[in-house]
Amino acid sequence: MSTAEPGSVIVSVETLSCFDYLVWLRTGENAARRLGVDQATVARTARKVAATFELKLEKQGGEWQILGDRNLLDLERSSHQLYRWQMDLPLRIEAQYYSGPLFLEPLPAGWLAGNFDFLEVSTPQQHLRSGVIDAWIGCFPDIPDADDPDLACVHLTRLPTHLVVAAGHPLLRLKEAVTLDDVHHYPSLALPDGAFPKVQAALQELGLWSTPCDLRRYDQAHWEGQTADEVTVGYATSVSLGLFPTPRVILPVPIPLEVGDTLVVPRRFLAHPRSRQLLAHLKRRARELVDRHPDVRLVGTSKNHTMAWPDLK
């Protein structure tokens, strides 16, 4: 195996980027498109990096898994990540399937986007912890804890979760008299166990989340489309309601589940000027959401926009 003195470089920035883009974006086609190279180059470079660190790269469940002792690789990633931030190289940002287009299209200067197709939180968090990506717009409440030593959170928005059904669903016949007990008579959509653990726990406590679908990446036809049987009860916010392939109706059954968008960055870069610039962009987009959706609120503020987000410290 290649060896190096502490702080020295084992593989070049370009070489490790090629490897990490494949892991992050999942396919050679996606990585090649972002990097401006051909797929053969991506595959060849990924094999070279894996061999350098005596690792194996294997796809499991649609995600690339790195098998072996990753300590040296992660040290190298940490050095490369610092170099990206300090030398004004493009930084990498990921987001949930609904929040990416809302907050990051168009992208702020100096950032490169992921696929915006995660339907779980463990993979993007792992990519952030290992330095594969530099920022993530996560889905509250399934974000790192406030005392996480490595990752810092800046909350952006909060909004209620609604139960939704197809336009011809039998529950709609009950009109305003419908109750949560009535909802329990029908299947309710669920993701694989642990995909969104805090959301899952909240919904299960309400007797929901009963019919799992085996999805960890977003595809409209296979996520919102799961309710196309006209019977399954789904979940939506005012922001995501329009993503369903066919119209959905909000049931008049409020549930105590508030979700939202949170910027998550490595704690060591929280006060970096590039974090501040990104946050300024996200604040503007969050205010636009509030203007378009009456039930969206900025964290800690009212609709008059008077609140100041916490300083990055």
Image (spheres, grey):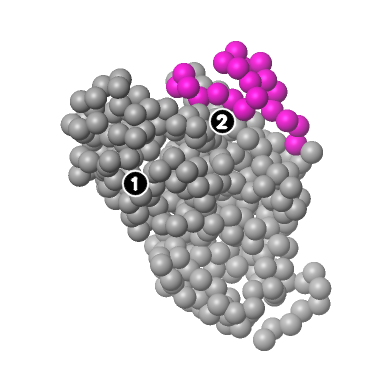
Q: Provide the residue span drawn in magenta.
A: 293-312
Q: Position of residue 167 (x, y in %)?
A: 21, 30
Q: Position of residue 135 (x, y in %)?
A: 61, 48
Question: CA–CA distance between discs 1 and 2?
Answer: 24 Å
Q: Is residue 30 left or right of residue 228?
A: right
Q: Residue at x 21, y 33 (%)?
A: 169
Q: Position of residue 168 (x, y in %)?
A: 18, 31
- Residue 287 lies, with reference to residue 279, above or below; the image says above
Q: Quadrant of the N terminus?
A: bottom right
The residue labelled by disc 2 is: 157
Mark 2, secondary structure of its residue: strand
Assess whether residue 126 is covered by the magenta stretch.
no
Badge 1: residue crowd in 10 Å (few <14, some 14–19, many ≥20): some
The amino acid sitting under disc 1 is Leu
Q: Quadrant of the C terminus?
A: top right
Residue 126 in sight: yes
The amino acid sitting under disc 2 is Thr
Farthest residue to the top: give it.
304
Q: Is residue 298 left or right of residue 257?
A: right
Badge 2: residue crowd in 10 Å (few <14, some 14–19, many ≥20): many
Q: Is residue 66 left or right of residue 174?
A: right
Q: Main secondary structure of the magenta part?
A: loop
Q: Position of residue 177 (x, y in %)?
A: 30, 22
The numbered mark at residue 60 is none
Q: Nearer the viewer, residue 247 or 283?
A: 247
The residue labelled by disc 1 is: 189
